Amino acid sequence: MTKAFASQADLDDKKITFEQLSAHCWAYTAEGDPNSGVIIGDKFIMVSDATATPAMARDLIARIRSVSDKPIKYVLLTHYHAVRVLGASAFAAEGATEVIASQGTLDLIVERGQQDMQSEMERFPRLFRNAESVPGLTWPTLVIGGGEPARGEVPGKLTLDLGGVKVQVWHPGPGHTRGDTIAWIEEEKVLFSGDLVEYEAGVYTGDAHLEEWPATLEALRALKAEAIVPGRGEAMKGQAAVNQAIAYTQRWVETLYAAAREAAAAGMDLKASMAHTRKSMDPLFGHVFIYEHCLPFDVSRAYDEARGIKNPRIWTAERDKEMWASLQA
């Protein structure tokens, strides 16, 4: 019996939490759904990750308006995935004049944004209930970085003054995608990591760079954050809890990729690699939200990377379903 495709059977609404983490930082989380972050300055507001649709974004805006009437000037795209970015148009009416992304994220939108939008809309029907409100792809107006930095340098760091609080925006290295971007509020030790870090939820790696991801996580650990808003999962408070979330993600990535390398070295095909990977992944992570959704995409990418395919192949709605039929039967 084939499992219901991706998250098509997940139709129950999640409980949303909007909580303050520091003097200027807030977390918008929803039981394993994609998270957003909010930084509220004396002059302006920044939102990190814009939700899946303008209709969903309006709920986030309502939460923000319950605590501040300042203009939402900046929207940060931590990466290009549709569930993170397609709600951005709703913020224009709230004063948003800049949509920020890394050069790597812009390149990925150009290369595969359209295919990703259609793919994710079919994977997540609940998150895209109001897909008719999406005007199209979200394009950044302010692009940071470009090219690879010299060893030890931070590429294209952008510092924004929201009034009373400064936000550093930069690309710490490849991981979840090759364009991942974070927001770091150094004075308050709060990190908005996007999907570079997850906690007690599936870590989607279908477009990942698995070999490099652990080093990127170490760069985040070195910040010594006191609070983090991960891409999925609850906001974590205290440095020990932040490190717990980073360690969770690192364990997922390293366990997955080790199994893929073993499968590739043994000459297994993709289906056999899936069965082999389950032996190490299921006992550790089988209980978490969207595990069964993520695993076949993750195994497919890990198997490719272990066999030398450096640039992740583009997911299309057709490829999604062909892969699912072969691995989740």
Image (cartoon, rainbow, N blue to C red):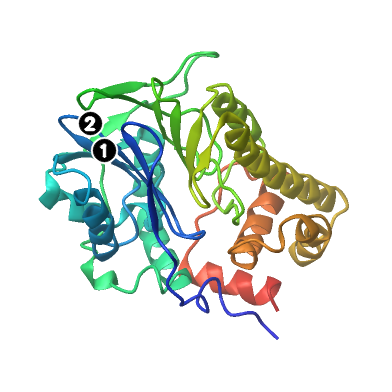
Give the structural element (helix, strand or loop) at label 2. loop
Q: Position of residue 68 (x, y in %)?
A: 19, 43
Splitting the image into 4 quarters, where does residue 240 fall? top right
In-front residue for pair 26/123: 26
Indicate the amino acid at tag 1.
Met
Identify which residue, 214 or 19, lies in the foreground: 19
Q: Are marks 2 and 1 in contact (CB under 8 Å)?
A: yes
Q: Is residue 52 left or right of residue 70?
A: right
State left or right for residue 87 relative to residue 302.
left
Q: What number of labels is visible?
A: 2
The secondary structure type at the circle numbered 1 is: strand
Residue furthest to the right in view is 266
Q: Earlier in the sequence, mark 2 or mark 1?
A: 2
What residue sits 55% from the left and 23% below the top?
224
Q: Is residue 319 visible?
A: yes
* Residue 60 x/y as whole percent: 28, 55
- At 64% from the left and 56% from the top, the residue drawn is 298
Res 256 label: none
Residue under label 2, please give it: 41
- Circle 1 is placed at which residue position? 46
Q: Say whether residue 308 is visible.
A: no
Q: Against 256, is 238 above or below?
A: above
In three-dimensional space, the C-alpha distance between marks 2 and 1, rounded to whole angstroms, equals 8 Å
- Name the residue: 25% across, 52% down: 88
Res 289 → quadrant? bottom right
- Residue 230, compared with residue 13, is above or below; it is above
The percent coordinates of residue 271 (x first, y second) are 76, 67
Q: Nearer the viewer, residue 239 or 131?
A: 239
Quadrant location of the N terminus in the rendered image? bottom right
Mark 2: amino acid: Gly
Circle 1 crowding by C-alpha within 10 Å: few under 14, some 14–19, many from 20: many
Give coordinates of residue 205: x percent, y percent: 59, 51
